[in-house]
Image (spheres, grey):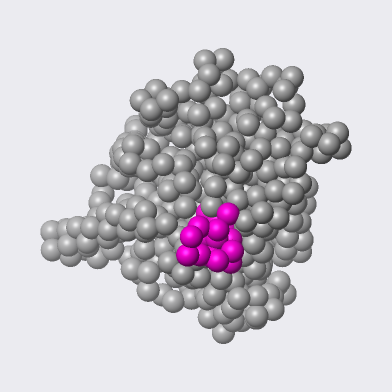
Amino acid sequence: MSETTAVSDRPELKRVMGPGLLLLFVVGDILGTGVYALTGKVAGQVGGAVWLPFLCAFVVALLTATAYLELVTKYPKAGGAAVYTHKAFGIHILTFLLTFAVMCSGLTSASSASKAFSANFFVAAGIGKGHGTALMITALTFMTLIALVNLRGVGESVKANVVLTCVELTGLLIVIAVGAWALLNGDGNTARLTEFKVPEGETAFGAVTAATALAFFAMVGFEDSVNMAEETKDPVRIFPKMMLIGLSITGVIYVAVAISAIALVPPDKLSSGDAPLLEVIKAGAPGFPLEIFAWITMFAVANSALINMLMASRLLYGMSHEKVLPGPLGRVLHKRRTPYIAIFFTTALAFVLIGYADLTALGGTTAFLLLCVFAIVNVAVLVLRRDKVEHKHFRAPTVLPVIGAVLCVYLASPLSGRATKDYKIAGWLMLLGIALWAVTWLLNKYVFKRKADFDPSHLDPSGPVN
């Protein structure tokens, strides 16, 4: 069979997503755990000017988005950072490391969502704030439930994403509305918006970059939409507009939420717990039932955790299927057809992360891993300029991916003030990946007498959902 015939016989996905659904998909993927859980942690690093790191993170995400837009419109049937990296550089180990980094970012993101879920659960259940062991047990129980749902198998749909997006968006709009109402009635303190918390020996610039390195976690998710290219009507035409509009909408929402939060709650109090937006509602609308908002928050972060654990286990399964990770990770349940070994493995890693790291470290590690991925994508788009295609596509001004790559590297580096624990967690995770890869390579070469031919187009390297 000729290559042309083979391609023509390949079933295509149904193109069901128009501009509206694609916009909701982009917005829904970005909204989530980051802003619900980490607004207080960002305030703890920068003080009252908590809105500024979110604005800076938006700018970096926007620059990187232009690189993704050029690649997805240039290769509308191929999606994901691993595919673009492999096409640009053709180095299997680099492609593997990038893919494994994306998988690990899903685990750290889901683990942070578990901690946020636990903190809000006690409020939603009317128990009050949980402490220590109770919070840990709740977070681990939640992750176990996610694993059980994952084992059973979950069919995600665009319609479900619309519902989830509306719920997540409603919670944030409530915060903005409460803040606006309080400010109009003279209850807020807008003077805090220009106050910086500068640790001794640091500058305001250093404090902002350190906070931006963490706040970037709230902006990730836009890159997932490239995996919907084959299900989008006329992706070359509508993708650029909808992704840029979606990013802008979330950027405005995040800045508005940050302003509302800090105007109503002092930064020290805002950063003291894992449910900062509950403090905002309590301060700005004492009569509002906190349990309702807590349930909204739980719904938002639970969705983030489920999607990230689904992504991580399927990505691990895909790497096993491509013979770059041990074969047992590719085993599936006979009846459910779900990758149960990969699910057990990723859940066990999530348990370790929940027990070892706090919410700030998990969010920071997620941002660090994806900043590294985005830096490579920004370089890859420039390398792939030599690969010409016949159809018209979006072309980012060369300066944008260059600046994007530089900023991503800077925010991922110690120069930005990034916490040492981020590197420790990411380092141990990547060492585990390299060890598994090395074992698999040795088995393939000397035991099974076969070489692994890594084809990243079989993978679906979606990044974490916030």
Q: Is residue 66 left or right of residue 406?
A: right
Q: Is residue 416 above or below residue 162?
A: below
Q: Is residue 59 above or below residue 259?
A: below
Q: Is residue 23 left or right of residue 112?
A: right
Task: Locate residue 449: give its quadrant.
Answer: bottom left
Task: Locate residue 229: give its quadrant.
Answer: bottom right
Residue furthest to the left in view is 447
Q: Position of residue 433 (x, y in %)?
A: 30, 56
Residue furthest to the front in view is 200
Residue furthest to the right in view is 184
Which quadrant is the C terminus positioned in? Answer: top right
Residue at 44 percent of width and 47 percent of height:
362
Q: Position of residue 429 (x, y in %)?
A: 32, 53
Residue at 50 percent of width and 65 percent of height:
202
Task: Locate residue 355: give its quadrant.
Answer: top left
Question: In the rendered picture of this protein, how many numbered marks are placed on residues?
Answer: 0
Q: Is residue 202 magenta?
A: yes
Q: Is residue 107 above or below residue 297?
A: below
Front residue of 302/338: it is: 302
Front residue of 89/194: it is: 194
Q: Position of residue 70 (x, y in %)?
A: 65, 70
Q: Position of residue 219 (x, y in %)?
A: 61, 53
Q: Is residue 464 magenta?
A: no
Point out the stretch of residues depicted in magenta.
197-215
Q: From where the camera sits, is residue 217 visible? A: no
Q: From where the camera sits, is residue 31 visible? A: yes
Residue at 66 percent of width and 38 percent of height:
265
Residue at 65 percent of width and 81 percent of height:
398
Residue furthest to the top in view is 126
Tell me which secondary structure the magenta stretch mostly adopts.
helix
